[in-house]
Amino acid sequence: MTDVNGIRCLPSGALGLRPGLLLAVLLGFGLGACGSSEPNTAPTTTDRATTTIAATTTATTSVTTTVATTAVPPSEVPATTTMTTNTSTAAPSPLPGQELLVPVQPSPTIDGTLEPGEWDGASVGEMSDGTGLFVMHDGESLYVAIDGEHLGAINIAIGGPKDTWILHSSAALGSVRYDSGGELSHDFDWCCRDADDPSSRLALLDAEGWQANIGYTGEPGIVEYQVALPWVGAAIAASAQTEVSEPAFFPPGLPPEARAQLVGPWPSTRTFQRGDWYTLLPAEE
């Protein structure tokens, strides 16, 4: 395994099937009626910050990560650095900017389970609480996985030249879209509550260009996304809320105001601080 600025490129077979987790009770996430314009979310906390991640290189059969977690005042939140995959064992120097290089890999199954080998070779980062975040593409769609431990509400933000989408997964799937002027142009229309029937998720993929598993499928805390929206050169950020911990954010060094923009409620106008997000670029093959 190699590590570059908090991003790990895992060797084949390094991701094993996670052991079963006790099913947590999820309350207040995506439980509104279909067509509801207001998702229910956990209370938002935006004044918590953590340091970046220091990871060590290990043998190819294990993954060992040391997480340096230190509470700091909002004014001292460390700046994020470039995130990329790398196959060298040497410690490279940080690159300028906030580019997230996305490697090409076979398409995963969107079912909330990290099967052995399924996400090997993906760029792997950590949210502000140490939760793993995987990113890769198959030549067309972008794939993102959150490797959490508790049921909750996940928001993946994708900001393109014309609009910004917030793609929400909890007990249901739904999205909001803001145009380039910050005006809300698409509100939540909840769907895909059936854990056993993927047809509604595929319909959402056709209609809006994305799908994900809901929290009640797969293993608790693991959410996988397929994003067929234009993603090359777009900006990405994420939030994860559960009822057992404070919200977590990606990039981990987001300032408080940028963090607050990634959780609900969603007003009729919102201008995102996308300069604090990562820019998605395909990695060279």
Image (cartoon, rainbow, N blue to C red):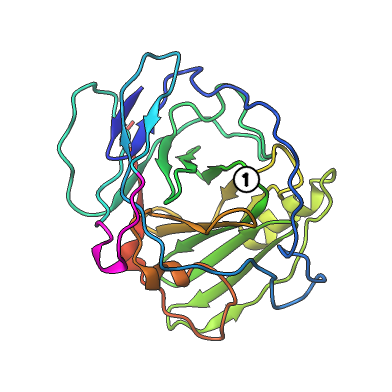
* Local crowd size for mark 1, using a 10 Å CA cut-off: few (<14), some (14–19), many (≥20): many
**Which picture quadrant has residue 10?**
top left
> Is 28 displayed left or right of 258 in the figure?
right
Q: Residue at x 45, y 48 (%)?
A: 129
Q: Residue at x 57, y 34 (%)?
A: 107
Q: Residue at x 45, y 13 (%)?
A: 61
Q: Residue at x 48, y 31 (%)?
A: 105
Q: Residue 7's spot in the image, x, y percent?
A: 35, 37
Q: Is residue 230 visible?
A: no
Q: Residue 121's spot in the image, x, y percent?
A: 43, 28
Q: Is residue 44 above or below residue 143?
A: below
Quarter of the image for the N terminus: give it: top left
Q: Is residue 275 magenta?
A: no
Q: Is residue 75 magenta?
A: yes
> Is 269 displayed left or right of 255 in the figure?
right
Q: Is residue 140 above or below residue 273?
A: above
Q: Secondary structure at mark 1?
A: strand
Range shown magenta: 69-78
Q: Residue 239's spot in the image, x, y percent?
A: 51, 58
Q: Is residue 187 visible?
A: yes
